Image (spheres, rainbow, N blue to C red):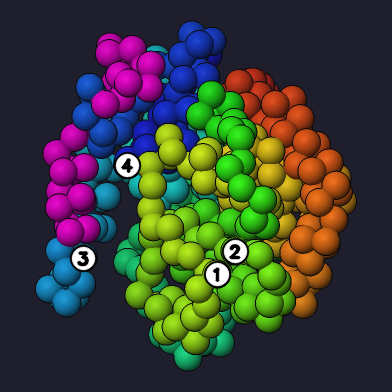
Amino acid sequence: MKVTISVFGRFHAFNLAQQLQQKQCLKALISTYPTFIINRYGIEHELIRSIWHLEVLIRAWRRVPIWLRGTNNLPFLFRDRFDRAAQDYISSGSDVFVGWSSLCLYSLRKAKELGALTVVDHGSSHRQYQTQILQEEYERWGLNFNLPYAEMYERELQEYAEADRIAVPSLFSKRTFVERGISEKKLIYVPYGTSLTEFYPVPKLDKIFRVIHCGGIILRKGVQYLVKAFCELKLPDAELWLVGSLAPEMKPILAKYENERIILKGKYPQSQLHWFYSQCSVFCLASIEDGFGMVIAQAMACGLPVIHTTNTGGEDIVRDGVDGFCIPIRDVEALKEKILFFYENPAGRSHMGDNALKQARNSLSWNDYGEKMIAAYSTALAAK
């Protein structure tokens, strides 16, 4: 079996490519990253197809102030150009084509013409569900939710319809597809892994009880409910660390709950995150919508118990009451209850953290993910 992967950027595609390469199943990796950077991930030079100038353009665009961008749609045009250019790197030697959602309609069609099994890899919930729940959330906070690039939205729905399979990383994500009429037989369900060489526990340097959130500090991640819960608890000798980029939409909310024990740590490279996890006591991802919170597996690999919502993919890897707890979205009282449990039960906290670490080491590596994905591709290919 030979597999071609097409991705604008990186996501978890490079981890998937590594696994396919190890099994001699990788035909090509098409990406906007330069070849020399992809080489650092262990991908062989001759398997890389780099459309690097589009990565330069999209990164330059991100540096343009929002007030200067106007109403033009350059990011969509960059992605459209990538999809069309990727067609040139798809050959008849590919048995399976894997493209990232909203980025692969034309390349998917080319692969299908050449007889390949076509798979859309989608890391979130169904686009219609995602849009609906985020619109609701923004309205709750008196903000306007602007659908980014309507053309990409429509293109993604078309990809769902035309692909042979759609790969999703969580039961939560899977449910949103089935509820919108996608046959369960069309879905490949495999949770993502994590790097056990990058994420591992190191000694905690003090005895302060800390809750950590890692990821974007945005409404989608439910940070607004986490800071409210933490402030209302008023726990002595406790801190909340927020690690990630702060979105403008969150600034007035954080100002409302201003507290010297809520500490904005900023954004750090992935290679440094294990230290932040290790200095904390419990990890919390209170997301409103997250197809699979990869930070959950990272935190578990660093020995932290996890509090997560039903909409994070946490239920797929966190055993409720063993490695952590699952709670409903937007439930401040449930957040307070679980944070207080860990604060008042250091022995239980330590035990559940040990359980989470063992769970990560036993079943959450990228090797585990790769074996399951290759098996899923093989099954789908045989059925085709």
Dot 2 or dot 1, earlier in sequence: 2
Number of other residues with Cα within 10 Å of mark 1, as a class: few under 14, some 14 to 19, many 20 or more: some
Label 2 to label 1: alpha-carbon separation: 5 Å
Label 1 to label 3: alpha-carbon separation: 41 Å
Coordinates of residue 166 in the picture (x, y in percent): 57, 43
Residue with the mark numbered 1: 261
Label 2 to label 4: alpha-carbon separation: 37 Å
Q: Between tags 2 and 4, which lies in front?
A: 2
Residue with the mark numbered 3: 73
Q: Label 1, secondary structure: give it.
A: loop
Q: On the picture, is 289 further left or further right than 338?
A: left
Residue with the mark numbered 2: 239
- Magenta stretch: residue 53 in it? yes
Amino acid type, label 3: Asn
As drawn, which residue projects farthest toward the bottom? 142
Residues at badges 1 and 3 in contact (C-beta under 8 Å)? Answer: no
Image: magenta residue range: 37-63
Residue 289 occupies which quadrant of the picture?
A: bottom right
Residue with the mark numbered 4: 8
Number of other residues with Cα within 10 Å of mark 3, as a class: few under 14, some 14 to 19, many 20 or more: few
Amino acid type, label 1: Arg
Coordinates of residue 170 in the picture (x, y in percent): 67, 47
Residues at badges 2 and 1 in contact (C-beta under 8 Å)? Answer: yes
Q: Between tags 2 and 3, which lies in front?
A: 2
Q: Label 4, secondary structure: give it.
A: loop
